Image (cartoon, grey):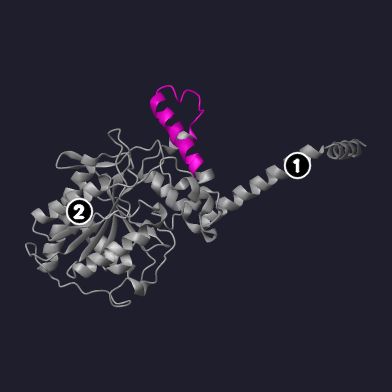
């Protein structure tokens, strides 16, 4: 009797749901399903792992987020908890919308990314397989390499002090700058701080007898998303004009969500930005680019421990012009929170590393 009465009341309550309640329930169900499927996609594609790895590298306060609301926790660490809240809000926006408010590219990329890269409105559409947003590759491999798929053979070994140019430098995203001292972190249509870092690297290498050329052609003034389609022409021209080039460097700075602290390392007693290596795997010899990067990182660890971010960032769906040279590398000197001085110091330290590698190669 009691059980029958219970079922009767449940059936009655079930029937009196209004149309609005049904719509609301359906909507919540769809949202929940999409979130679960999105999380499953992120875990399967590796995006979640890369994102957590990135947060760990930035010393993200996971415990502060997890302990939020615990009795008495916030009182002794109020400033740190407030910072954790700001970071949590920024990361939440990044995950839910794909918008990184410190990076204008994401204002539309989160909604117009290529469908195979996942749900277009989720944060991991800020594609971990192409972190520098190379965009569509517009030209075939054969149209930019001098001899079809065959790479040019540099006239090496070349000892430091030779008049030959063996290092080529350019900047795909010329407008990138540093806001660590309160200035703008981007100068649209102009050569920003990152070009100065490239020039610092060139001058430091030349002082060590390493022939270097730095092309300051602007590539991102007209269309930021097609910058690589412009810089590939510059990179190919550098190799054509200077056939002895052994190392071809594209110099960038990283971009972090708001609220994150910058990373620095002590170099000769002063703060310097850290260097991140990015390798594009969508090229037939990316392992050779990787091998060079690891040799340079090993030398740096002995000369200036911590100068490089310990893990290389790999891009499965991009090439970043590295298909043009076995010595093609994309290097990110700090992020928008660093200062120009910090990245110039990193460039000077890297020049020591590269010069030593050149010396070892020539011996």
In the displayed structure, does residue 331 sit left or right of residue 56? left
Vertical comparison of 240 with 71: above or below: below
Identify the mark nearer the N-term, 2 or 1: 1
Q: Which residue is mark 1?
A: 23
In the displayed structure, does residue 136 sit left or right of residue 159? right
Residue 130 x/y as whole percent: 42, 57
Residue plotted at (26% across, 41% down): 264
Give the quadrant of the C terminus.
bottom left
Residue plotted at (40% across, 23% down): 76
Along the line of sight, which residue is nearer the eye, 276 or 204?
204
Q: Which residue is mark 2?
A: 300
Q: Main secondary structure of the magenta part?
A: helix
Residue range (magenta): 66-94
Residue 90 x/y as whole percent: 46, 38
Q: Is disc 1 placed on a helix, strand or loop? A: helix
Residue 195 x/y as whole percent: 24, 49
State the CA–CA distance, disc 2 to disc 1: 60 Å
In the displayed structure, does residue 2 sit left or right of residue 301? right
């Amino acid at each position: 009797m009691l059980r029958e009465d219970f079922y009767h009341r449940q059936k009655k309550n079930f029937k009196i749901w209004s149309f609005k309640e049904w719509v609301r329930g359906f909507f919540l169900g769809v949202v929940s399903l999409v979130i679960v499927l999105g999380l499953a996609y992120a875990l399967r594609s590796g995006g979640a792992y890369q994102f957590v790895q990135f947060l760990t590298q930035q010393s993200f306060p996971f415990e502060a987020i997890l302990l939020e609301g615990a009795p008495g926790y916030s009182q002794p660490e109020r400033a740190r908890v407030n910072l954790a809240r700001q970071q949590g809000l920024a990361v939440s926006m990044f995950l839910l919308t794909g918008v990184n408010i410190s990076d204008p590219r994401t204002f539309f990329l989160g909604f117009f990314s290529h469908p195979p890269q996942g749900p277009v409105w989720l944060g991991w559409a800020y594609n971990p397989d192409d972190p520098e947003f190379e965009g569509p590759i517009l030209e075939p491999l054969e149209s930019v390499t001098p001899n079809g798929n065959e790479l040019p053979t540099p006239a090496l070994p070349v000892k430091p002090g030779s008049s030959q140019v063996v290092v080529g430098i350019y900047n795909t995203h010329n407008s990138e700058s540093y806001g660590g001292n309160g200035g703008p972190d981007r100068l649209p249509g102009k050569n920003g701080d990152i070009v100065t870092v490239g020039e610092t690297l060139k001058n430091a290498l030349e002082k060590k007898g390493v022939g270097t050329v730095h092309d300051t052609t602007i590539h991102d003034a007209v269309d930021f998303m097609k910058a690589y389609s412009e810089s590939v022409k510059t990179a190919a021209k550098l190799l054509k004009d200077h056939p002895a080039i052994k190392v071809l460097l594209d110099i960038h700075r990283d971009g972090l969500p708001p609220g994150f602290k910058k990373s620095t390392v002590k170099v000769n007693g002063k703060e310097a930005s850290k260097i991140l290596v990015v390798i594009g795997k969508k090229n037939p010899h990316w392992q050779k680019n990787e091998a060079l990067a690891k040799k340079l990182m090993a030398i740096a660890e002995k000369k200036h421990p911590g100068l490089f971010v310990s893990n290389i960032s790999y891009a499965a769906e991009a090439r970043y012009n590295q298909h043009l040279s076995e010595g093609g590398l994309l290097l990110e000197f700090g992020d928008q929170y660093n200062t120009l001085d910090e990245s110039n110091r990193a460039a000077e330290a890297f020049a020591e590393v590269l010069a030593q590698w050149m010396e070892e190669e020539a011996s």
